[in-house]
Image (cartoon, helix red, strand yellow):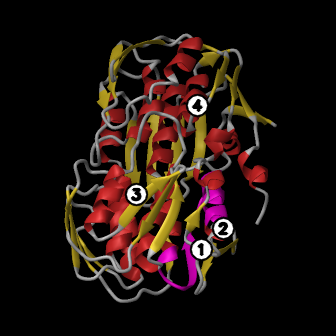
Amino acid sequence: MRAVADILEHVSRLIVRPSGPLSGEVVIRGAKNSVLKLMAACVLATGRYVLRNVPHISDVEHMRLLLEAMGIQTRWRDDDALEVVRGDEVTPEAPYELVERMRASSAVLGPLLASVGEARVAMPGGDDFGSRPIDMHLQGLEAMGARFSLAHGVIEGVAPRLKGTEIVLEYPSVGATENLLMAGVLAEGRTTVHNAAREPEIADLAAFLNRMGGRILGAGSSVITIDGVDELRAVEHRVIPDRVEVATFLSALGVAGGELDLRGVRVDHLDLLIEKLGRMGMRISPEAEGLWAMSKGRPRPVDVATLPYPGLATDYLPVLVALQCFSTGTSYATENVFSGRFRYIGELARMGARIRVEDHHLVIDGVERLSGAPVRAVDIRAGAALVVAALGADGETVISDAHHIDRGYEDFDARMRAIGADVQRVD
């Protein structure tokens, strides 16, 4: 296994300078928030899997290292096809040095308990924007017969055979819904999850599990029914496109102006985002292979608030706030999903943004231009938001800790340059 430091400790900066309007074509990569869970689901059955439309991002590399630490082989077959080979023996342990870098690593809990009967998983890390407890994951799995203990920061679970049951989630948690899907597919009897998350990534995971031989109904609705089966098989699957990438490139277009064609987009996953951007003044039209968008002038002020799907995704908010910084009036932004996700606001303020934080609300007074400044990316989407904001800033913006951006965006700087932005990486 490659040294963890080779991937995890790479540090770089992005330098962004003002440029003209954006133009050209962007091919949207596979969804980060889906592919990591699909990789975790490969624990469920022996055989050779092929996942297509997989982005080359560091979180995928982190998950590859985690699977390899468990004895599961992975390799790139071609540009975007990842092969995963699960043999008969699996080490049911997710070590801290890998788990601390990526919260999605908690997704291996359900498949390990369902297929191996035990799991040892360090408490997950990832982006630092408030507490995101996995209590609902554990409570749901306990209702299915698993037993957990916590010692020295490691969750240890055992489950000789999970049993289907009725589970009501306190909140439509994406992570908990995904873990229960992967656990229930091999459980004895029927598992029904009420108040389930409805995100497109849930439906993508359910489609993958059904292709493996699972029996899941209702994915994409608030009630999901899973009839357990005795065995599953390895399959091939194409990952859905990343809707957060779409929001990021459209926000960049809103700041810089211009015209873009986004290819490989699922427009049906983006209804509310497109409606909000349209109200800001952007012109967006669906096309056969994606969507076309044009932006000219400063955006109109529009209020946004995050909610579970089909509401606006919490991952959209930082880039939308960066766009709101340039509006012709006062906008409001509300974060209803995660507490503590406003750490990037201080970085935008360093660039001259006029933003007030009031509890979980932001009051944003738009300005015509920001000023380039040294800033720091505190997480994936905050880093992308700083790049978006820098497109409308005079002078040079230097974004440190740009490795956070690499966790969720493939070749972000090169793809921005390809559409006319002046974004350079300095290692």
Q: Which mark is residue 266?
A: 3
Q: Tell whether 348 sits left or right of 231.
A: right
**Residues shaded magenta:** 43-66
> How far is mark 2 from mark 3, CA to CA?
34 Å
Residue on which disc 1 sits? 91
Q: Nearer the viewer, mark 4 or mark 1?
A: 1
Q: Secondary structure at mark 2?
A: helix
User: What residue is at 61 percent from the left and 17 percent from the top?
Assistant: 393
Residue on which disc 2 sits? 69
User: What residue is at 66 percent from the left and 52 percent from the top?
Assistant: 97
Per the image, is 87 magenta? no
Q: Secondary structure at mark 3?
A: loop
> How far is mark 4 from mark 3, CA to CA?
29 Å
Callout 2, which amino acid? Ala
Q: Quadrant of the N terminus?
A: bottom right
User: What residue is at 42 percent from the left and 58 percent from the top?
Assistant: 149
Q: Are marks 4 and 1 in contact (CB under 8 Å)?
A: no
